[in-house]
Image (cartoon, rainbow, N blue to C red):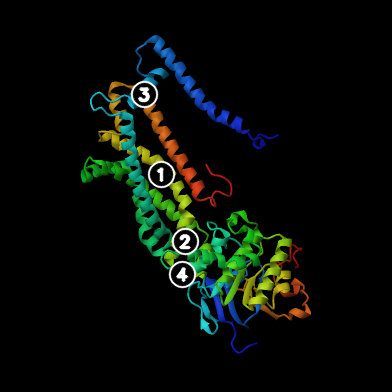
Amino acid sequence: MRLINRKPSRLTAFALGMAPFVAAIFAYAVASHYRRLDNPADKLLPSLPDMAAAFSRMAFTPDRRSGDYLLWIDTFDSLERLGAGIGVSVILALSLGILIGFIPHVRASLAPFIATFSLIPPITVLPILFIIFGLGELSKIMLIVVGTAPVMIRSVAQAVMDIPRELIIKAETLGASVWQMMVRVVLPQILPKLITAVRLGLVPAWIFLISAEAIASTSGLGYRIFLVRRYLAMDVILPYVVWITLLAFILDRLLLMASRRAFPWYHLGGDSL
Amino acid sequence: MSAQPKVSVRNAAKTYDGTVVLERLNLDIEPGALCTIVGASGCGKSTFLRMLLSQETPSRGEILIDGEKLPPEPTPDRGIVFQRYSVFSHLTVEENLVLSAEFDAAPLTGRLFGAARSKARDSVTETLERIGLDRARTRYPAQLSGGMQQRLAIAQALLKRPKILLLDEPFGALDPGIRADMQELLMELWRELSMTIFMVTHDIHEAFKLGTRVLVFDKVRHDPDAPDAYGATITYDLQLDRDSGAAVPDPGTLFSSPTMTTRGDAPDA
């Protein structure tokens, strides 16, 4: 049989999916082992047990100075910023995106501006945000908004314009007002695509979050890894990177599950990533 | 024919950027007619239907319904069934049918709640049974066959009691067997409601089987130096007597262009 027609069984698919992870961990363990043969105090590639110990210290031992459980404080603070930033972006994307996609006059007036605004490299406005909003939470949240909202607004507007015109005309012949079409046709039609936009927006959102925390913060996952960098503490940095990745992965899967649960009609024909 | 025609078209034409698509359209359609519209692809029959719907406006001339000028946008007095995307994919069968009642009753939310909602849902039960979708009432359109989706679309459009029903190749994507069932259903509904129906089809047999009036669209005037100067118009306007069972004429006698075929027959040049 041709290769394209051979489909792996569930078990095979799982094993194949795990193989690259196992290989990466194995390669790391081997490299770490040989480095530490040369120099038992090597800091660059700490052993897996060392990293586990450092991670459990961050998670389960109170900090000597503050008495806080640092990992959980960092995680909570970072997720709070991420959630607030993405939340604001979602509200902007829904309100502006639907108006731009649905009302030609709003599109004519706002689409060129948003398109231009979305081309500003967000990190370049970070100094401006720090000057305007200070070094507190607001400037970090605003950076995430500046970095994610324009693209999300545009993808929602595009999703609205991709709704088959037939559906809108049908709604008109059923006597719907513009507002009724927005809440009963346009909004439900684009909500699954909004979730996709959020999932894609989370990728840059994490980048801006970690950047803002690295530059000016006193807590958060990004703050922590840039802080311990000064002591070459790879045994903390590497587990934190894995932890951040895991959080991002879980958020992504939760959104996908929420979409499948809430919009079964959208996921009926074929499945998406 | 009664005193006032249901639909009157007065010297209507449609031009896109200098290209004449339709020209010199003059027509009076009596109430209760089932008017089928045939023609080669690209001859403007769907454009004509879109003008009846106000999805497009005539470049010249005017269209009257019950003696009054058409509103400039689609309104509930004209129901529509498209070939595809006629029902709302995010709503179940039942929700699709209740939607227009919800638009009427709830200007702000477009949604009914509690007792009003139960009542609205109960009120469509008869319709669901009539179109054979009572077992599928909680399914989404993507879980229905093409024929079931189109039955739902027709029922949804009729619930609004439009003055005229517009059908744009409604059965074009269906299998022949299903298509015959759908034609049957359409004829029954048309007789029951004695409604004026316009139906665009590319199937000339369907046009003559269903129609009480067959309009043939074709491009008859050609200028070799300016191919866009003239558009299509109504070349034949045939009043059919349903009971005598009119024979389907040879397409070659109806169309000047060799592109028109019937059900995949070889082009009749």
Pointers 3 and 2 within a single chain = yes
Mark 4, other Cα within 10 Å: few <14 / some 14–19 / many ≥20: some
Q: For the residue labelled by badge 1, is the local secondary structure a helix, a strand or a loop?
A: helix
Residue depth check, mark 3 versus mark 1: number of the one nearer the observer: 3
Q: State how far apart marks 4 and 3 are (Cα).
A: 60 Å
Q: The disc numbered 1 marks a residue on which chain?
A: A
Residue B121 in the image, given as x and y percentages of width and height? 54, 64
Query: What amino acid type is highlighted by mark number 4?
Result: Ala
Query: What amino acid type is highlighted by mark number 2?
Result: Arg
Are dots 3 and 2 in contact, CB under 8 Å? no
The residue at the point 47 percent across, 56 percent down is: A188
Q: Name the residue under label 1.
A: A201
Residue B266 in the image, given as x and y percentages of width and height? 76, 63
Q: Mark 4 points at which residue?
A: B105
Q: Name the residue under label 2.
A: A184
Mark nearer the N terminus (3 vs 2): 3
Q: State how far apart marks 4 and 2 are (Cα).
A: 13 Å
Mark 3, other Cα within 10 Å: few <14 / some 14–19 / many ≥20: some
